[in-house]
Image: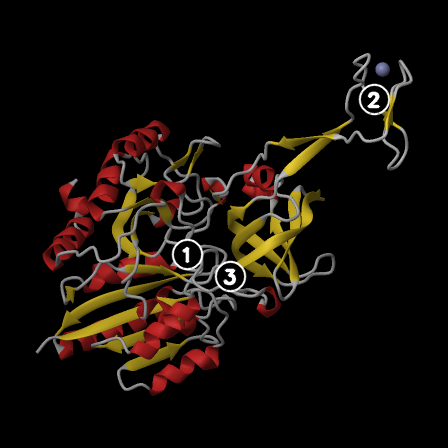
């Protein structure tokens, strides 16, 4: 009798390097022959605005089935590998592992939805240990069980995407990534179902991360076939150690599911807030753009920070009275600023009309009139004619902003940001054949033998 086992872990990396997907990819390689995979490994990004996170706040879930004895072996492999590879010497690395056998309890799924936008404590996550088919393992202070549980309870039943990851060999960690830049542009053009490979606006290649991360390149797309095709067109100029394809909630806006009135905002939440512009946009030191919005409950500052580039210029055209929906992370108050929404997206729903006012012309000589004083009409300086009843000429000005959605450029996107390229896409309910999953994983794991 085969049984399902869902495995997840988080917070195995530190700011210095390493990476949770790297560890997961090692584990997938290690256990592949032992059990059947019922999905691609899942890369789940959780609330990106929480404190204590390492970069993207991503956790990994592996979903398999097998006989009891095989699953027992796999469980030991996971625990041993996490213990061996995680940077436990770093006090900011506090791994957590979660196992769920058979069906994922609905309470765990609800927890996962909350983990997309809320701040959750370790004890809250730990309560799930009492469920019969849930096992949680804490290392260090065990903060990672929050992400592990968040990942395990999100089997990507809503919109999802794929990411193809290629890893470097250990000897190259920390060095400059060697890649044929032209091949990235060619791969991008040849694969319409991949996205955000390149930011053409800022001429920036997006598939290669920076720094000590063991990832060589990540290619994101709508289907596993397409991300693999794109990778086959990219020319790495250094040794590649491993490949893996993850199914993921990246680029789905899944963290923006909860609407808040302004008086209920709290630091580190990912929020959707409707409001009316109540203070005009203005730039502050550091070239950040700030404005305020108001709803029936309160008022709050919103910021488009410098790295969002031209996004600031677009939003600077908002004015008092415009109605907007702000999607962002709540930044706690600091010494020099009140609590502020860090804007990740903004939708304009209505714009006020703006007018210019000019003095009218003299009917006798055609000269531009001068005001005769407040509420006293106008007089002509050239021919001395007086017009008590004339009004200023009102002219409607074109607004430099439209009723639509605004996003920062790709270089400033977060992992969860749904880019314009996939704005009308949604992969919910797309079925993937089990044999396709297994065949594809086999191909990825054996890539060195075939190349
Ligand atoms: Zn005149």
Residue 271 disc label: 3
Which of the 4 image quadrants contains residue 263?
bottom right
Image quarter (top left, top right, bottom left or bottom right) of the N terminus: bottom left
Give x and y (percent) for residue 167.
32, 48
User: Foreground: 193 or 280?
Assistant: 280
Find the distance from the CA under tag 2 to the CA under tag 3.
52 Å
Any atom of ligand 1 within 8 Å of the CB at mark 1? no
Give yes or no for contact between labels 1 and 3 (Cβ–Cβ under 8 Å). no
Q: Is residue 295 left or right of residue 130?
A: right
Instruction: Look at the image and name its color scheme.
Output: secondary structure
- Determine the secondary structure under disc 2: loop
Q: Is residue 415 above or below residue 373?
A: below
Give x and y (percent) for residue 451.
17, 40
Any atom of ligand 1 within 8 Å of the CB at mark 3? no
Residue 369 disc label: 2
Q: Residues within 10 Å of mark 1 (few under 14, many from 20)?
A: some
| Pair 1/3: label in front | 3
**What residue would you read off at disc 1?**
18
Q: Is residue 386 above or below residue 334?
A: above
């Amino acid at each position: 009798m085969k049984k399902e086992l869902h495995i997840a872990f988080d917070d195995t990396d530190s700011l210095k390097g390493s990476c949770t997907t790297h560890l997961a990819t090692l584990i997938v390689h290690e256990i592949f022959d032992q059990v059947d995979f019922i999905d691609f490994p899942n890369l789940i990004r959780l609330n990106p605005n929480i404190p204590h996170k390492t970069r993207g706040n991503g956790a990994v879930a592996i979903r398999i089935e097998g006989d009891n004895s095989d699953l027992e072996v796999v469980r030991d492999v996971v625990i041993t590998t996490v213990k061996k590879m995680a940077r436990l010497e770093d006090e900011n690395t506090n791994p957590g592992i979660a196992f769920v056998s058979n069906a994922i309890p609905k309470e765990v799924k609800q927890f996962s939805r909350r983990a997309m936008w809320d701040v959750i404590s370790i004890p809250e996550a730990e309560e799930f240990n009492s469920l019969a088919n849930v096992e949680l393992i804490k290392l260090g202070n065990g903060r990672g069980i929050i992400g592990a549980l968040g990942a395990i309870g999100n089997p990507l039943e809503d919109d999802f995407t794929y990411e193809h990851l290629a890893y470097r060999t250990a000897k190259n960690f920390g060095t400059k990534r060697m890649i044929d830049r032209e091949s990235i542009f060619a791969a991008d053009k040849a694969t319409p179902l991949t996205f955000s490979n390149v930011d053409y606006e800022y001429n920036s290649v997006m598939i290669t991360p920076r720094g000590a991360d063991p990832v060589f390149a990540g290619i994101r797309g709508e289907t596993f076939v397409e991300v693999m095709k794109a990778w086959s067109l990219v020319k790495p100029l250094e040794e590649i150690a491993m490949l893996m394809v993850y199914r993921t909630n990246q680029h789905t806006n899944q963290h923006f599911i909860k609407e808040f009135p302004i008086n209920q905002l709290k630091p580190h939440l990912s929020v959707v807030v409707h409001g009316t512009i109540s203070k005009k946009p203005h730039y502050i030191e550091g070239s950040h753009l700030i404005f305020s919005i108001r709803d029936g409950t309160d008022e709050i500052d919103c910021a488009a920070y410098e790295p969002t580039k031209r996004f600031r210029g677009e939003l600077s055209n908002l004015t008092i009275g415009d109605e907007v929906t702000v999607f962002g992370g709540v930044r706690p108050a600091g010494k020099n600023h009140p609590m502020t929404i860090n804007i990740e997206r903004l939708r304009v729903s209505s714009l006020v009309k703006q007018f210019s006012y000019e003095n009218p012309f003299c009917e006798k000589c055609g000269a531009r009139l001068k005001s005769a004083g407040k509420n006293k009409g106008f007089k002509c300086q050239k021919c001395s004619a007086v017009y008590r009843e004339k009004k200023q000429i009102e002219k409607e000005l074109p607004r430099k902003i439209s009723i639509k959605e605004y996003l920062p450029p790709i270089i400033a996107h977060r992992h969860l940001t749904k880019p314009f390229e996939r704005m009308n896409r949604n992969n919910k309910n797309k079925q993937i054949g089990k044999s396709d999953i297994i065949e594809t994983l086999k191909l990825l794991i054996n890539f060195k033998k075939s190349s």
